[in-house]
Amino acid sequence: MQDIKKNSAVIDLFCGIGGLSQGFVLEGYNVISGYDNDKSCRYAFESNNHAKFYEEDIFKLNGKDLNEQFGDKLKILVGCAPCQPFSTYSFRVRKKDPKKINLLYSFSRLIEETQPTIVSMENVPQLVDFAKFTIFQDFCDRLKSLNYFVSYQVVYCPDYGIPQKRKRLVLLASKLGEISLISPTHAPDRYITVRNIIGNLSPVKAGEYDPQDPLHRARKLSDMNLKRIQQAKEGGTWKDWNDELLPECFKRKSGNTYRSVYGRMKWDEPAPTMTTHCTGLGNGRFGHPEQDRAITLREAALIQSFPMEYKFYESIDKYNPSVICKQIGNAVPPKLGQIIAKSIKEHLNKHKEQL
């Protein structure tokens, strides 16, 4: 088979700041463009992936536009439709935002209009709960009707060297033959841990940042929350606090539902799943294992497997911590993108005589 980088083209739908695309770039693929309706993602996507960012409503996008970009290259269409509509919470309120739920149907429409050789879709595991949604089954059935071989699995990210306990649904589809994700790369005794990833970073205090790295910034804590984190043990939660530090809602029986909020991470385990609010102490187990603060943007980015050199903002006057945190939390971990890209590369090599 000829050089994949020169003879393939990757287009990333719902690209965000380019986590999925970055995985393909690291594997030598030619990522040509990404589409998202969040214009704040443009700088990071284009600067790190050397591809064109299009601020576009996927509902209005048509296959002709994509085919013009693909040209005569081998077509690879990938994407991660926003996962919030399929979260546990959103199952209860899904009727309030049907447009977001229908994004996956737009994805399958674009597949039909462009007929790429390879398709990959990444999303939350809850999507396969057919008792609540048939949309994923509809997506698979449509691909099969278009003569794609389809496989999917729920991935536990530490099995592939990603240092967080994130579970993701990964679908692969090919016109060439059966396709699947490569085997796990890390056994449990070789999982990448919080210590492996952020243990060597400079210490910072709550409300401060490393002058050498503005992204290594910790949010300021109130006096009460500072007292709370000081009483939390490594791997602990609010249950470590003295009673006078507990809010009334935590003292009630229903307080047990809060579980990990205000908790500290463990040094020698993968981190919890990064979210769009992962630098806030009260939003989950996002406390540093030993420093009295929540994790920084830099730590969140590294746990998401973004390279240290990844650019998140154009200049200091455009530095917006809350926007960057949301972008990092929404992103596909680049290392997971790289695993998907490796799997596709192995598949293409296996079927090189058909290309």
Image (cartoon, rainbow, N blue to C red):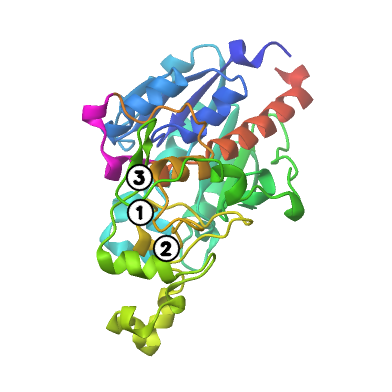
Whole-angstrom CA distance, mark 3 to mark 2, is 14 Å
Q: Which mark is residue 277?
A: 1
Residue at x 35% of width, y 53% of height: 277
The magenta segment is 315-327
Q: Is residue 145 visible?
A: no
Query: Label 2 neighbourhood size at 10 Å, few (<14), some (14-19), many (20+)?
Result: many
Question: CB atoms at circles 3 and 1 under 8 Å apart?
Answer: yes
- Relative image position of residue 260 (x, y in whole percent): 46, 69
Question: CB atoms at circles 2 and 1 under 8 Å apart?
Answer: yes
Residue at x 73% of width, y 46% of height: 186
Q: Is residue 326 highlighted in magenta?
A: yes
- Relative image position of residue 283 (x, y in whole percent): 37, 62
Q: Identify the secondary structure beneath mark 1.
A: loop
Question: CB atoms at circles 3 and 2 under 8 Å apart?
Answer: no
Q: Which mark is residue 284?
A: 2
Whole-angstrom CA distance, mark 2 to mark 1, is 9 Å
Who comes first in sequence, dot 3 or dot 2?
Answer: 2
Between 185 and 139, the residue placed more toward the observer is 185
Whole-angstrom CA distance, mark 3 to mark 1, is 6 Å
Residue annotated with mark 3 = 325
